Image (tube, coloured by chain):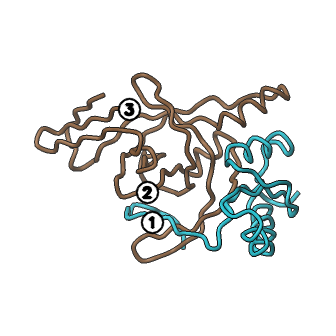
Amino acid sequence: MPETHDVLDLALATFEANRRRLVQEAPGKFVLIYPDRIAGVFDAEDDALAQGYERFGNVPFLVKEITETDVPIHMMSVLFGMES
Amino acid sequence: MQWTTADLRANGPVINVGVAVAESLEQQLRHVGAAVPQPRTVLGLIDTGASTSTITPELVADLDIKPHDKVVMATPGRRVRVPRYHVRLVFPPNGFVVKTFALMVPLGNTQLHCLIGRDVLAHADFRYDGRFGRFGLAF
């Protein structure tokens, strides 16, 4: 099994490949993807998460709101010791 | 609850906060008879500059949780993609629980393992009184 972030990247790539269609069919809903297959679309994020845990267990499945673009999360704190 | 600290200006509003796995993960682990990671109590900084709460990679490893998205985080001067985790934050003294999605972000050479962001403050009354070195957080 690939590493955690490889699996999530695979799911994200699947989302991007299907984003346009998903936006047309289910805007504002939440898609569940693992590892590279769309496992369902849900009205509520909690429902998608619960379904992901039930079907796949504690693994890095993707739950993502279906939107045309991703909005960045703004953090004004400069404490972070992350690598860019 | 109100805290008084000797050096609020230097340390900021720091509190103990419990971090636990998501309720839906806990239910699934119990369902299959697996061990549920115990909540960890860590030092968290109340950060009005953070739109979303964060947890450190060490805490993620301790809780054995997996990410369910990666999001673009914009800080002054850079943008990076960071993983996002579904957790519960538990606040003293009454154990008020906030279900949220925390970003995994290293916090450098500090004792902090959590930034408590505006996603939590949306549920709270936060007061900062620098004159007397005290602050309060009520839910």
Please, what secondary structure does the residue beneath circle 2 have?
A: loop
Please tell me the numbered disc located at residue B139: 3
User: Residue B67 appears at what percent x and percent y?
Assistant: 68, 53
Could you tell me how far apart the alpha carbons at marks 3 and 1 are, in whole angstroms?
24 Å
Could you tell me how far apart the alpha carbons at marks 2 and 3 are, in whole angstroms?
18 Å
**Residues at marks 2 and 3 touching, judged by CB atoms closer than 8 Å:** no
Q: Which chain is cyan in the rendering? A: A
Vertical side of A50 occupied by B50: above or below: below
Please, what secondary structure does the residue beneath circle 1 have?
A: strand
Is B99 situated left or right of A14 in this image?
Answer: left
Q: Are marks 3 and 1 on the same chain?
A: no
Which of the image's four quarters has the N terminus of chain A?
bottom right
Please tell me the numbered disc located at residue B51: 2
User: Residue B59 appears at what percent x and percent y?
Assistant: 58, 44
Chain of the residue under the numbered disc 2 shown in the image: B
User: Residue A74 appears at what percent x and percent y?
Assistant: 45, 65
Q: Which chain is brown in the rendering? A: B
Q: Identify the residue at horizontal 80%, vertical 72% (top origin).
A: A18
Amino acid on which disc 3 is placed: Phe
**Residues at marks 2 and 1 touching, judged by CB atoms closer than 8 Å:** yes
| Residue sticking out furthest to the front | A25
Chain of the residue under the numbered disc 3 shown in the image: B
User: Residue A20 appears at what percent x and percent y?
Assistant: 75, 75
Chain of the residue under the numbered disc 1 shown in the image: A
Q: Name the residue under label 1.
A: A74
Could you tell me how far apart the alpha carbons at marks 2 and 1 are, in whole angstroms?
6 Å
Where is residue A22, by image quadrant?
bottom right
Amino acid on which disc 2 is placed: Ser
Mark 2: give few (<14), some (14-19) or many (20+) Cα within 10 Å: many
Please, what secondary structure does the residue beneath circle 3 have?
A: loop
